[in-house]
């Protein structure tokens, strides 16, 4: 159902009168509903098609109530909020145009470029990276990125991307807030499950912010500075910022979890709860001794652990160790960790054994090119 409203492309129109709220289905309507049977007999019948975007759609998200849909096209620089009635008719939508930095309102009602509009359209320079609904569906949040203007010859731009977060009224399309706190793409954007005005963002710049979307203030922030060396070829290095990739709030909203490019999972708490204190006592590097045991193939080609002769997934895990396979001192001294001491499996390596194993690995890696050359010569 094409959005054939009459507003001209790029022309702001009066905000349409909002549709009356859509009443949720009554329990009796769903009592005898069989989804599998319905899908089998519907043969995947198309109920509705929405038209309006002129570039590939990269984000689609239902509102929490399920009565509206927001879509975004990254290269087009726009997002659209769609609405329809219970019969899948009377389709309306508003356009959130990220190219228009207009505090009085960034939405245009039902803008629908005519055929051939692609050639008249200026090349878009703003990209939509992410979209998110607030928990009460009152706001739609967009994350956008734009290449920084060219710097003078011989100079390197300290900020290659301009990043902005925009908070929109989901009914009128009015731009409510512009949030500026990141210098690289933001792919983690989560609104609080209980407080609709609170937003968590984190990005490839290694920065994390918790916002009040109503006031535009940052309530809390953190920088993901690398504080330990996991690998000789590690990137980023100690002291640099490590990119955040994904995360979420806890269901009760008392904390959130984020994961980064180095495989670290970080837990944050917004209150001094017992759970926060319990996480603080956990070991930062959690590996098992069995993760480091050498493997072999048996005569049938199955992989076994060399020391136990068992498949890796059946091998006792052993104790917690650091990434260097060295045990935590507390794990072998404190009586509170008796359970860890009694864990089945091989004991961790001592410092001397760890250095010997690392030296053997380096020696083997140094001899690898000669081995490959010799094997190639024999094959010839």
Image (spheres, rainbow, N blue to C red):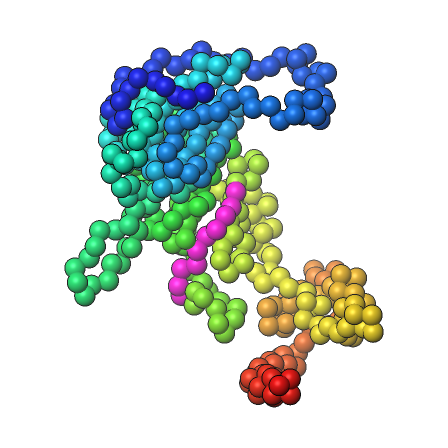
Is residue 139 among the parts visible in the rendering?
no
Q: Position of residue 10 (x, y in %)?
A: 26, 28
Left or right: 289 in relation to 135 = right
User: Which residue is most to the left?
Assistant: 152
**Viewer-proximal residue, 227 or 67?**
67
Place residue 360 in its image quadrant. bottom right
**Residue 245 shown in magenta:** yes
Quadrant, the C terminus = bottom right
Q: Does residue 151 lie above or below 195 as drawn?
A: below
- Percent of width and height locating residue 100: 25, 33
Picture layout, residue 344 above or below residue 134: below
Closer-to-camera residue (288/131): 131
299 lies above or below 282: below
The quadrant of the picture occupied by the N terminus is top left
Q: Residue at x 54, y 58 (%)?
A: 263
- Rendered location of residue 355, percent (x, y): 60, 82
For the point 17% across and 63% down, the residue is 153
Report whether 320 appears left or right of 240: right
> Is residue 5 at least partly visible in the picture?
yes
In the depicted view, which residue is nearer to us: 206 or 186? Answer: 186
Q: Nearer the viewer, residue 206 or 157?
A: 157
State the residue at coordinates (76%, 61%).
Answer: 313
Which image quadrant is residue 213 in?
top left
Magenta residue span: 238-248
Residue 303 picture location, percent across and down: 76, 68
* Number of marks drawn: 0
Q: Is residue 256 magenta?
A: no
Which residue appears at 38% of the width and 40% of the height?
74
């Amino acid at each position: 159902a094409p959005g054939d409203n009459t507003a001209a492309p790029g022309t702001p129109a009066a905000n349409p009168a909002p549709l009356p709220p859509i009443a949720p289905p009554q329990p009796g309507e769903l009592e005898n509903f069989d989804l599998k049977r319905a899908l089998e007999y519907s043969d995947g019948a198309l109920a509705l098609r929405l038209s309006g975007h002129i570039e590939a759609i990269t984000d689609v998200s239902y509102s929490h109530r399920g009565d509206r849909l927001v879509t975004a096209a990254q290269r087009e620089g726009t997002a659209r909020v769609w609405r329809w009635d219970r019969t899948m008719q009377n389709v309306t939508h508003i356009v959130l145009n990220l190219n228009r930095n207009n505090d009085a309102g960034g939405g245009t009602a039902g803008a629908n470029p005519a055929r051939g509009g692609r050639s008249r359209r200026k090349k878009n320079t703003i990209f939509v990276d992410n979209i998110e609904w607030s928990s009460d569906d009152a706001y739609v949040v967009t994350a956008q990125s734009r290449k920084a203007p060219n710097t003078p010859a011989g100079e390197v731009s300290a900020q290659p991307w301009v990043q902005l977060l925009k908070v929109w009224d989901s009914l009128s399309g009015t731009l409510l807030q512009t949030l500026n706190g990141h210098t690289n793409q933001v792919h983690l954007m989560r609104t609080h499950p209980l407080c609709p005005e609170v937003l968590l963002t984190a990005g490839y710049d290694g920065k994390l912010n918790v916002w009040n979307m109503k006031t535009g203030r940052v309530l809390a922030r953190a920088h993901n500075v690398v504080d330990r060396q996991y690998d000789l070829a590690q990137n980023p290095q100690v002291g640099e910022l490590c990119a955040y990739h994904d995360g979420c709030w806890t269901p009760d909203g008392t904390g959130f979890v984020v994961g980064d490019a180095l495989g670290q999972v970080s837990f944050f708490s917004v209150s001094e709860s017992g759970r926060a204190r319990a996480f603080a006592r956990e070991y930062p590097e959690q590996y098992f001794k069995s993760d480091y045991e050498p493997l072999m193939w048996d005569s049938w080609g199955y992989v076994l652990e060399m020391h136990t002769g068992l498949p890796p997934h059946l091998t006792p895990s052993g104790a917690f160790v650091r990434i260097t396979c060295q045990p935590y001192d507390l794990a072998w001294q404190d009586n509170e960790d008796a359970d860890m001491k009694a864990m089945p499996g091989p004991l961790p390596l001592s410092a001397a054994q760890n250095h010997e194993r690392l030296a053997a690995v380096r020696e083997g890696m140094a001899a690898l090119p000669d081995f490959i050359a010799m094997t190639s010569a024999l094959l010839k």
